[in-house]
């Protein structure tokens, strides 16, 4: 579950930055849809190091949408790849952004660390967590 949150954070970062064109995936690295008990579906709040706050929603099919307040700022797909949550922005020319989830804190939040070292604090919304 926390990997999904990290994934949502990655998507948020991917939507905010443009990267190089994605490299061709290695034959050994494949993204698999999460098992039902590990579904990433839900709404997540992310806080970035500069204080920026974003909301990410992920549906049952692994599609995400990032919001800055009520304004959509990005969308794409999210998947678990090699124990990381990877956000693939639908924006042309963007590269996937992958996060490694830290251990959950007492309040249920966790820190997701991007491959570039950026740390994002993520929290799944309670109403979503209670519904699972």
Image (tube, rainbow, N blue to C red):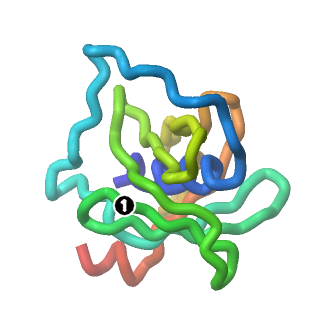
x, y (%) of residue 80?
34, 40
Residue 115 against residue 80 in the figure, above or below = above
State the SS at label 1: strand
Is residue 54 left or right of 132 when viewed as pictured?
right
Residue at 23 percent across and 53 percent down: it is 38
x, y (%) of residue 19?
67, 35
Residue at 62 percent across and 62 percent down: it is 46
Q: Residue furthest front?
A: 92
Q: Residue furthest left?
A: 36
x, y (%) of residue 27?
27, 15
Residue 52 against residue 119 in the figure, above or below = below
x, y (%) of residue 40?
33, 58
Residue for badge 1: 63
Residue at 73 percent across and 55 percent down: it is 48
Query: As rendered, which of 117 and 63 lies closer to the eye?
Result: 63
Q: Give the total of numbered labels.
A: 1
Res. 107 in view: no
Q: In the rendered view of the protein, which quadrant contains the C terminus?
A: bottom left
Query: As rendered, which of 105 and 6 lies closer to the eye?
Result: 6
* Disc 1 packing (10 Å; few <14; some 14–19; many ≥20): many
Residue at 52 percent across and 37 percent down: it is 96
Query: As rendered, which of 107 and 33 lies closer to the eye?
Result: 33
Res. 126 in view: yes
Residue 129 against residue 28 in the figure, above or below = below
């Amino acid at each position: 579950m926390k990997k999904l949150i990290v994934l949502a954070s990655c998507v948020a970062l991917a939507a905010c930055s443009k990267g190089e064109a994605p490299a061709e995936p290695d034959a050994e690295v494949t993204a698999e849809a999460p098992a039902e008990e590990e579904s990433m579906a839900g709404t997540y709040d992310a806080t970035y190091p500069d204080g920026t706050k974003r909301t990410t929603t992920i549906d049952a099919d692994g599609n995400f949408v990032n919001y800055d307040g009520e304004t959509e700022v990005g969308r794409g797909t999210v998947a678990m790849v090699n124990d990381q949550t990877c956000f693939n922005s639908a924006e042309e020319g963007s590269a996937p952004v992958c996060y490694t989830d830290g251990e959950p804190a007492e309040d249920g939040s966790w820190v997701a660390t991007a491959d570039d070292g950026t740390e994002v604090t993520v929290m799944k919304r309670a109403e979503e967590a209670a519904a699972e």
